[in-house]
């Protein structure tokens, strides 16, 4: 790998001090940030890049996704969550193949790189094919193979097989890959299966990625059946005794919030999905006040339609301000932290997410010279409120350029589109049946 010097940049570090440096330089030595601002005279770059004032900042981390579900984009629209599952997705997934998972994920990675996402937490099926896609493309990922824990409706895997998958892939691709257990949710998985999952995770020292408390109805059903909320139940069954990502957690009580904080649970918010399916507004400001690590996710394109973390940032702010009639909520750089360092932490990558010496060289360049940014009175506000995926000019992961001047360097977009269309055509030949059944 080369030593690279980025010159005359606006550097948004997202470090603990939230430093922003103007007309500054950043040195990259192989796969790490060597210096920010004050460049040692001994640093010998192989390449110098003049950014002319453009922003360089940490790459974004998608903390909850079903990447392969690009194949379901716009498939099941304008219906409530139960119908989306039962009439749409959980019929379409009966035709799922390893090939559509691979090509759907490759298409998602194209979209994510082009939008500045350098890593994603994925919760889906046929995850060995997702791992291959990550390995080939150069991004980071945390992969959890979704399991329901039932005798029917599984996609070829059990808890022991999941552990084998985790052991094989965790730490692979030069450390760009992490792997976790992926029980689907407390509303779909049997109680004994969840307890076993928690015990196995602690014994094997692996993490867990799970959905919980998505709707008020789910919470009420849990209270009726167990006298506990879904969050309380998961804590009681030991699923929070390891590194855990909980997707959504929209309907959390005060007791739930204290559990999430005390157990250091990572919470992934997916505002597009929450709003699109009228699921509710999560208590994000209160979570943050209690010290919960709240990150942002796009969910799958089958629900959110776009893998666009810039949109998720804005919606995260807007939904809270509207719901609470408070125009100060989630202000300043908070959305950037949720999409950057908080996401990296949720995925289990502790040495990335900020631009600081010794941290991984995972970064993006945003073309803030474009007309729709002008004038840039406030760099942070400009990034949050003005940036679209097409404004991301360059993307680097572990010191390797994945995109330069909007040109993808590690993958062939046209070949991926062709492969995806072929796999989709084969999938569409399969008669559909009911894969799972959702009950609110």
Image (tube, grey):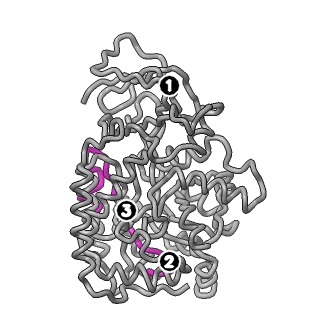
- Distance CA(mark 2)–CA(mark 1): 49 Å
In terms of sequence position, does the residue under pointer 2 or pointer 1 come before the other?
1
**Quarter occupied by residue 403:** top left
Res 67 label: 3
Which-is-in-front pick, marks 2 and 1? 1
Quarter of the image that includes the N terminus: top left
- Distance CA(mark 3)–CA(mark 1): 33 Å
Q: Residue at x 47, y 20 (%)?
A: 8
Estimate how packed mark 2 is, as few (under 14), some (14 to 19) or many (20 or more) residues with alpha carbons within 10 Å.
Answer: many
Q: Residue furthest right?
A: 325
415 lies left or right of 324: left
Point out residue 74 in the picture as x, y percentages from the top left corner: 44, 71
Which-is-in-front pick, marks 3 and 1? 1
156 lies left or right of 296: left
Q: Residue furthest top?
A: 41
In terms of sequence position, does the residue under pointer 3 or pointer 1 come before the other?
1
- Is residue 336 shown to the viewer in this render? yes
Residue hosting label 2: 186
Q: Residue at x 48, y 85 (%)?
A: 438
Q: Over which residues does the magenta segment extend?
A: 166-189
Q: Which sits in the foreground, 390 or 304?
A: 390
Indicate whether residue 380 is drawn in magenta: no
């Amino acid at each position: 790998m080369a030593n690279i010097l980025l010159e005359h940049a606006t550097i948004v570090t997202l470090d603990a001090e939230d430093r922003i440096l103007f007309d500054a330089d950043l040195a990259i030595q192989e796969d790490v940030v060597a210096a920010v601002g004050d460049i040692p005279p001994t640093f010998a770059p192989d390449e110098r890049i003049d950014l002319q004032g453009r922003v360089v900042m940490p790459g974004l981390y998608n903390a909850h996704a079903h990447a392969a579900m690009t194949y379901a984009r716009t498939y099941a629209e304008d219906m409530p969550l139960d119908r989306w599952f039962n009439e749409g997705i959980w019929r379409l997934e009966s035709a799922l193949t390893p090939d559509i998972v691979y090509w759907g994920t490759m298409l998602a990675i194209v979209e994510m790189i082009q939008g500045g996402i350098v890593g994603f937490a994925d919760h889906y099926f046929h995850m060995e094919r997702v791992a291959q896609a990550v390995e080939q493309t150069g991004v980071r990922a945390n992969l959890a193979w979704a399991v329901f824990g039932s005798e029917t409706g599984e996609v070829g895997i059990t808890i022991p097989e999941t552990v084998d998958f985790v052991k094989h892939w965790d730490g692979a691709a030069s450390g760009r890959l992490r792997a976790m257990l992926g029980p689907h949710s407390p509303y779909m998985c049997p109680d004994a299966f969840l307890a076993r999952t928690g015990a196995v995770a602690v014994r094997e020292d692996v993490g867990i990625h799970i959905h919980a408390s998505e709707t008020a109805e789910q919470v009420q059903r849990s209270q009726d059946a167990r006298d506990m909320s879904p969050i309380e139940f998961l804590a009681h069954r030991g699923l929070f005794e390891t590194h855990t990502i909980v997707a959504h957690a929209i309907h959390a009580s005060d007791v739930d919030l204290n559990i999430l904080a005390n157990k250091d649970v990572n919470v992934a918010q997916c505002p597009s999905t929450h709003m699109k399916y009228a699921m509710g507004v999560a208590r994000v400001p209160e979570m943050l006040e209690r010290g919960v690590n709240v990150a942002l996710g796009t969910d799958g394109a089958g629900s959110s339609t776009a893998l666009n973390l810039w949109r998720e940032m804005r919606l995260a702010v807007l939904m809270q301000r509207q719901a609470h009639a408070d125009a100060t909520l989630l202000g300043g750089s908070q959305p950037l932290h949720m999409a950057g360092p908080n996401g990296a932490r949720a995925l289990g990558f502790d040495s990335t997410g900020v631009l600081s010496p010794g941290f991984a060289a995972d970064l993006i360049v945003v073309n803030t010279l474009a007309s729709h940014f002008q004038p840039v009175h406030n760099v942070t506000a400009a990034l949050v409120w003005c940036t679209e995926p097409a404004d991301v000019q360059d993307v680097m992961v572990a010191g390797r350029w994945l995109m330069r001047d909007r040109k993808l360097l590690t993958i062939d977009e046209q070949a991926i589109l062709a492969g995806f269309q072929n796999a989709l055509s084969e999938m569409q030949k399969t008669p559909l049946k009911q894969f799972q059944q959702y009950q609110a």
